[in-house]
Amino acid sequence: MDISNYLYLSAILFTIGAVGVVVRRNAIVVFMCVELMLNAANLAFVTFARINGNLDGQVASFFTMVVAACEVVVGLAIIVTMYRSRRSASVDDASLLKR
Amino acid sequence: MTTSSHLVYLIALPLFSSALLLLLGRIADKWGHLLATLVSASAFAIGVFEFIAMHNRTGAARAVTQKIFSWISVGSFQVNASLLLDQLSICFVLLITGVGTLIHIYSIAYMSHDRDRRRFFAYLNLFIAAMLLLVLGDSYLNLYVGWEGVGLASYLLIGFWNQKPAYATAAKKAFVANRVGDVGLSLAIMISFAQFGSVSFEGVKAGAPHASKAALTAIGLMLLLAAAGKSAQFPLQSWLGDAMAGPTPVSALIHAATMVTAGVYLITRSNFIFDAAPIARLMVVIVGGITLLFGALIGTAKDDIKKALAASTMSQIGYMILAAGLGPVGYAIAIMHLLTHGFFKAGMFLGAGSVMHGMDDEVNMRRFGGIGKFMPITFATFGLGYLAIIGVPPFAGFYSKDKIIEIAFNAGGSKGWILGIATLLGAAITAFYMTRLVVMTFIGSKRWDEKAHPHESPILMWLPMAILAIGSVASGFLFNSGNSLVNWLAPVLNANGVEGGKELLKPAVVSGLALVAVIIGVGIAFAKYRSNVPAEAPENVTVFTKIARRDLMQDAFNEAVLMRPGQALTEGLVKTDHYFIDGIVRLVGSIFLGSSKGLRRIQNGYVRSYALIMVIGALALITTIWVVTL
């Protein structure tokens, strides 16, 4: 199997994630789409590590996972707080900074 | 040079009194006029004292100086506020304080019904102080302070009854016309500073022989402009007629005897400039010649007694300027005519005021007639002034005006003939309009309303008139006997000596011609106005009379040539500012406003749109890199 198929998969996953972030309003779904984009990036990293035959990409993917874990912690906390205060998890309602 | 410590009181006393009367307000109403008169009289006393002291000294010691304080001290440029009293200034000091005191006394009675009499006297004192500073300053800069001061006092006094809008406008007109002249004086001061590094009379006099002709001519012309503004000479003459809006004593003091002659003082004081600048001097003669005929012609058509006298003043100052422009022989003659004119014209103005006082402030001579019977003292004093101004021997005007006609003829060549004939013509017209004035006012049938009750004025008014009349009779003879005034002024005015002009006509012939001119003028006026003067000005008159009634179109000229284009220019500038300059500013503003309006739409508060922008940006970046590296 051609190894570049992994890269196509990564691009498709990233695009799905990006479109999800742009079109969905539920904060949880947006959040999941962001995770999808991060994992698409991870897939690209390990694929390139495989192509180049070294471990650099795999190391970078670990960093991404750590960042994603931190982001989940902070992000979920924000979403939960937002939901508690306004009984909604729509990202369109969270536009206070504009006003 | 002698130094003195009490010259400053000449100026300080009236200035202090003026400030006191203005600051105290109504408290001083009861005694304000007395204080002002007393101060003016004591200034006159100081003047007389100084004159006697000066007379007893000889030679260079006659001039007195006093340094009051150091005014400007910048590097090598030093200007002291210091006073100089020499043979020339003492003449003015005596004229200003002497005539000034008489007019103060006159005003006590003349203004007695005016509730602002105190303010009037405060302004009069202010004028006296400023005028004394003008003639006593030892540098052009000190003179300039006085020059502006008299302009201010003149403005305040012309507009004294400024509750009438026409009077307030007249004051403004005088101020603006004077301001044009003042620009000339300030330019002259700046040029002389640039040229000589000094603005004192002494410094400029010392530098004048080494200076370039062009600079001296420029200074001379600028000084002439200043003189024209202050002395109502062509082309800045139009304000004097309207200045008659002021109370009559003001017209007598400021607009006949003293302030309007400041231009003559300036030119004679700057004799060292004009001696070295023939072109400027020629212009002085031309301006004087034009004005003496201009004023005389206006005088023939005026029915307002004060305006007729004002036109006469303009014309007589034209004579003085003409004489001053004729060089060393003329300076002293100009001053002599100035002094005699100060007596007779002030006297006649006071006489006119006395007539107005008796006739309920009527000024139209067509409504007078036969007043001489009711006001014998006014008639007598006015008559003496009249004989003096038309130049009947042995009255004052004869000596001074005759001399001017004489030196005009002696100017040489065609210039001599032109000037001589112009001055002779002026003398004839002067005789005509003054006779017209006297006949219409004092002689002939009465044309006034039954309501008017002409009566002689109180002693406070006729006494000054009588003293001035004595001056009109005697001063010419005194100044002329043994050439006393010419010799007295010689050290100041004719430092280089008088070159003997060739005589075109013998003095006796000139006197004869002048007398003939006067007799013709008097004869015509007497025949024309002795009887049958209509009480209303006739309408079916020649176009020349109409033009003369309108002051020879001076206002129409100023309006068409200066005012309208000036207004058009101002309006154009306003429009340019509004539409062009402001337009650019507004355009810049609206560009930023519009673009920020567009940019603001991006900041819509939706996270997904921000994310989309980020995605688009990232895609654009990647595409660019991809295209570039391809």
Image: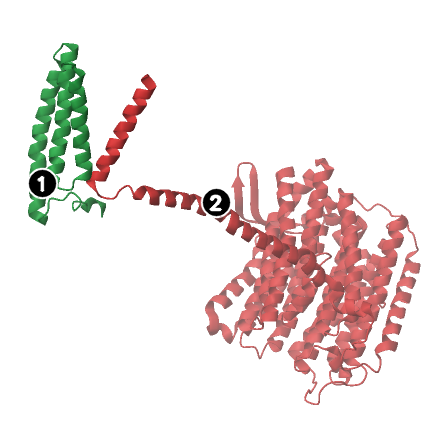
The amino acid type, in three-letter code, at marker 2 is Ile
How packed is label 2: few (under 14 Cα within 10 Å), some, or many (20 or more)? few
Q: Is residue A98 left or right of residue B596?
A: left
Chain on which label 2 sits: B
Q: In the rendering, at what x and y percent does residue B578 appear?
A: 51, 51
Gap between marks 1 and 2 measured at Cα? 51 Å
* Residue B29 visible in the current orientation: yes
- Chain represented in red: B
Residue B572's place in the image compared with B313, above or below, is: above
Q: Secondary structure at mark 2?
A: helix
Residue toward you, B496 or A48: A48
Residue toward you, B200 or B541: B541
Residue toward you, B602 or B87: B602
Q: In the rendering, at what x and y percent does residue B280 appear?
A: 75, 46
Q: Report which residue position mark 2 lands on.
A: B584
Q: In the rendering, at what x and y percent does residue B29 appear?
A: 50, 74
Q: Report which residue position mark 1 lands on.
A: A79
Which residue is at 11% across, 37% downward?
A29
